[in-house]
């Protein structure tokens, strides 16, 4: 049939911090997954949807694959693995940045584990070599590509810079080849499967990741307790949002609040701007900070925050 719709689910996997979420955002054309310079930014599977006429691609962004250190990490690793179920293909995102000490004889164990999963599942995969804007010598790219091609028969290799939108279209066009006749799972104007509360909590968490030092954000979770729309005096709609930031120690609470409340104010005003942009209306955002010791090892709390999905 000529008018048949097509779709494909594509898992985006790789080590932490290689640029998986940056690619998903660039391909969707809107920010659906938060991004930061700290590893382990993404905690759950997140779908980013890109509909091009009759074809819909659903990108399944996953947490960076790493060795679990606590219960939360175990859920994150599992999310990366289950992200490979029920997809038409996967993208292994690797980085070509000079920070990554590439050794052709010893590819990172996390990547080899993911490649072993592709083999086990007979899953076609594309290799995306990201951060090429940071690459000094182009010859290094060839060496890197040939080492990965030895490890797996990738269907295509795409060098890219997700940050500079370079190569993103090319990768999307490679991925369109995996689409199969099927109904679209999302409306044409839907960009993500995440409910509003999760989207907003993530926008707040992104600012904590960006503004606070390394150990603080990893022990932080955000819960949206209030979320409703009202009209202000001028009759304009305002989104009222109340969020609690959970952290693991009193000292972390102090850092998140900052001197005279300065840090919390900064987190709030940057997050508010993003939420306003996403929803296209005014937002009033109130933030509280609470300590929940060792929550990353407490299954009940992880579950109540929706991080075990
Ligand atoms: N220079 C450069 N930086 C990039 C590029 N793509 C992503 N980054 C940066 O790399 C960092 C990590 O990006 P993310 O998209 O959060 O990476 P991720 O793979 O989703 O990370 P996790 O969710 O922690 O697994 C951020 O600081 C990005 O701005 C790129 O093409 N070039
Ligand atoms: Mg991510």
Image (spheres, rainbow, N blue to C red):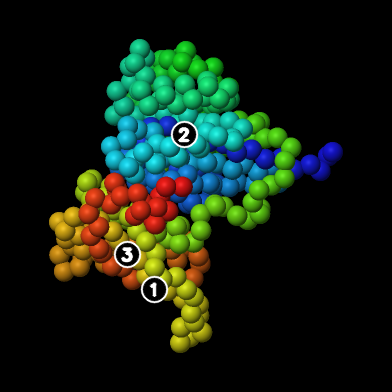
Give the residue number, with chain letter if any, for mark 3.
244
Which residue is located at x 29 percent, y 23 percent?
Answer: 101
Q: What residue did someone put label 2 on?
A: 81
Q: Mark 2, mark 1: which one is toward the viewer? A: 2
On whether ligand 1 comes within 8 Å of the CB at mark 2, the answer is no
Q: In which quarter of the image is the N terminus?
A: top right
Tell me what residue is drawn at x 28 percent, y 52 percent: 295
Q: Which residue lies furthest to the right in this view?
A: 1
113 relative position to 121: left or right = left
Disc 3/disc 2 C-alpha distance (Å): 30 Å
Residue picked out by circle 1: 284
In the image, 86: left or right of 297? right
Mark 3 element type:
strand
Mark 1 Cα-neighbour bin, 10 Å: few <14, some 14–19, many ≥20 = some
- Rendering coords of residue 239 (x, y %): 46, 73
- Measured in 3D between alpha carbons, the distance from the residue under mark 3 to the one under mark 1, in whole angstroms, is 14 Å
The Cα atoms of the two marked residues, 2 and 1, are separated by: 38 Å
Residue 296: percent from left, percent from top: 29, 48
């Amino acid at each position: 049939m000529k008018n048949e719709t097509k779709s494909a689910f594509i898992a985006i996997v790789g080590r932490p911090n290689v640029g998986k979420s940056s690619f998903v955002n660039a391909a969707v054309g809107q920010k659906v997954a938060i991004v930061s310079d700290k590893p382990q930014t993404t905690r759950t599977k997140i779908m980013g949807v890109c509909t091009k006429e009759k074809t819909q691609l659903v990108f399944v962004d996953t947490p960076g694959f790493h060795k679990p250190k606590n219960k939360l990490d175990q859920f994150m690793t599992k999310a990366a693995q289950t992200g490979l179920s029920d997809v038409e293909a996967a993208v292994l995102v690797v980085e070509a940045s000079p920070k990554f000490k590439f050794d052709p004889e010893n590819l990172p164990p996390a990547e080899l584990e993911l490649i072993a999963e592709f083999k086990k599942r007979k899953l076609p995969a594309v290799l995306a070599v990201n951060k090429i804007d940071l690459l000094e010598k182009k010859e290094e790219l060839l060496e890197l590509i040939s080492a990965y091609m030895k490890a797996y028969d990738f269907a295509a290799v795409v060098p890219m810079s997700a940050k500079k939108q370079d190569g993103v279209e090319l990768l999307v066009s490679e991925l369109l080849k995996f689409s199969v006749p099927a109904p679209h799972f999302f409306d044409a104007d839907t960009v993500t499967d995440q409910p509003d509360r999760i989207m907003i909590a993530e926008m707040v968490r992104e600012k904590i990741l960006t503004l606070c030092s390394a150990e603080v954000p990893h022990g932080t979770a955000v819960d949206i307790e209030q979320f409703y729309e009202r009209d202000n005096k001028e009759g304009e709609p305002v989104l009222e949002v109340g969020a609690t930031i959970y952290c693991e120690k009193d000292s972390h609470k102090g850092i998140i609040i900052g001197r005279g409340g300065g840090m919390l104010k900064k987190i709030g005003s940057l997050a508010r701007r993003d939420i306003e942009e996403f929803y296209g209306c005014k937002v009033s955002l109130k933030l509280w900070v609470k300590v929940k010791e060792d929550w990353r090892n407490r299954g009940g709390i992880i579950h109540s925050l929706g991080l075990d999905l």
